[in-house]
Amino acid sequence: MGAPLYARLLVAVRDDYDSGGTSAALLDGRSSRPIHDAIPLRLLGGVHRLVLAGKAPELAEFFPSAGGRSAGDPVPALLAVLDAHRPELEARMQQGVQTNEVGRAALLAPGFALVARRARLPLRLREVGSSAGLLLRWDRYRYAADGVELGDAASPLAFDDVYLPPAPDLSGPVEVVDRRGCDIAPIDGTAEDGRLTLLSFVWPDQVARFERLRTALELARTNPVTVDRADAGDWVQDQVRELPAGMATVVFHSIVLQYLPRDSRRAMKAALHEAGDRAAADTPLAWLRMEPAGAKHAELRLTSWPGGTEETLATSGFHGADIRWGAADGPADD
């Protein structure tokens, strides 16, 4: 997936684990579902955080995110860091992966535009699994395809080379009048600790992603949003209990469902469908979600009420690259 440095480090962690090294002590007993709970990425995120904080200069030489350019073998430096910083890494292993991947905004943005065109109403956004809320600020970024632009034309964060033919319709206007999110462990992206946490979970040899996140975090300083600490199921129930007239409510999420407890997923879906039954032309509801649809790509799906029409709008990579739009500007079953 375009991260050869992490591939090399993961092989080293596996070998160290098999030989009973520090990796075994760090990984054993963390989860009965280690891949599902992203345990390997928790470990590497903790290591990357040490590098970014200047605590692992010997390993930083290999991390492009920290300016490293060494073509040598990073494994001895990695193993030394695991030994020297074991207590701090153990503490980091208790925390889940927080990947507020701003690249996913490029996939979600045409979906928001589609909802706005159809409803002819401003948008009320409600995001599940918001992390630091960077995707709630999607309209603070710029998108371009086929000579059409969407978002903030003056934004320093632009997505103009991520759409494969056929390009999505980015036409507007799109007005966001209300935005709010929830997360089980929200991050304050305007604070240094929160910024470091988010940056640590970007794979260090993917410099473009890293710099894109830096830019989004800078924009977040002057564009506040509210992210509630809450369970997704309970929160969505509260947010769609009433659908305000004169705006289209859009509940959305990206690469989140796998991390939600089963009861929370069920409660969220039940709340959406119950609210959908109450939706009307002046109180429409949309459920927009980007979730895995295989080992290497994600799908953007949309369910729209009234009516409950469901569509697959597009596919992309998990980080928002190689976006292929595939839906007409109308319900799939029309």
Image (cartoon, rainbow, N blue to C red):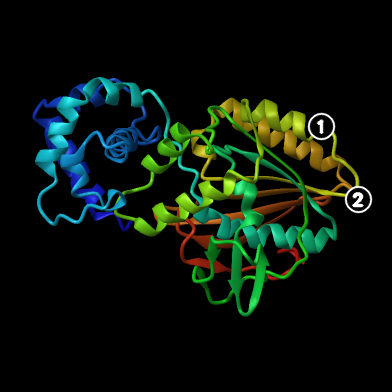
Identify the mark at residue 91; answer none if there is no mark.
Answer: none
Q: What kind of element bears circle 1?
A: loop
Give the residue number, with chain letter if any, for mark 2: 282
* Residue 312 occupies quadrant: bottom right
Query: Where in the figure is residue 105, as x and y percent of width and height?
Result: 57, 55
The location of residue 2, given as percent across then percent down, is: 31, 58
**Quarter of the image with the C terminus in it:** bottom right
Q: Nearer the viewer, residue 265 or 65?
A: 65
At a point 59% along the width and 41% down the height, the residue shown is 133
Q: Taking the image as drawn, is residue 60 in sight?
A: yes
Residue 284 on image: x %, y %: 83, 49
Instruction: Specify whether 274 is left or right of 183.
Output: right
Q: Classify residue 76 as left or right of residue 257.
A: left
State the quadrant of the N terminus.
bottom left
Residue that carries the numbered disc 1 in the rendered image: 241
Are discs 2 and 1 less than 8 Å apart at CB?
no
Residue at horizontal 55%, vertical 38%? 132
Q: Amino acid at mark 2?
A: Asp
Decide: few, some or many residues near mark 2? Use Cα within 10 Å; few <14, some 14-19, many ≥20: some
Q: How many marks?
A: 2
What's under tag 1, amino acid-wise? Arg
Question: Quick check: 281 above or below 316?
Answer: above
Q: Residues within 10 Å of mark 1 (few under 14, many from 20)?
A: some
Whether residue 134 is visible:
no
Query: Circle 2 — which element?
Result: loop
**Among the 4 quarters of the image, the one containing residue 313:** bottom right
Quarter where residue 112 is shown: bottom right
Relative vertical location of residue 125 with respect to residue 14 in this rendering, above or below: below
Between discs 2 and 1, the one toward the N terminus: 1
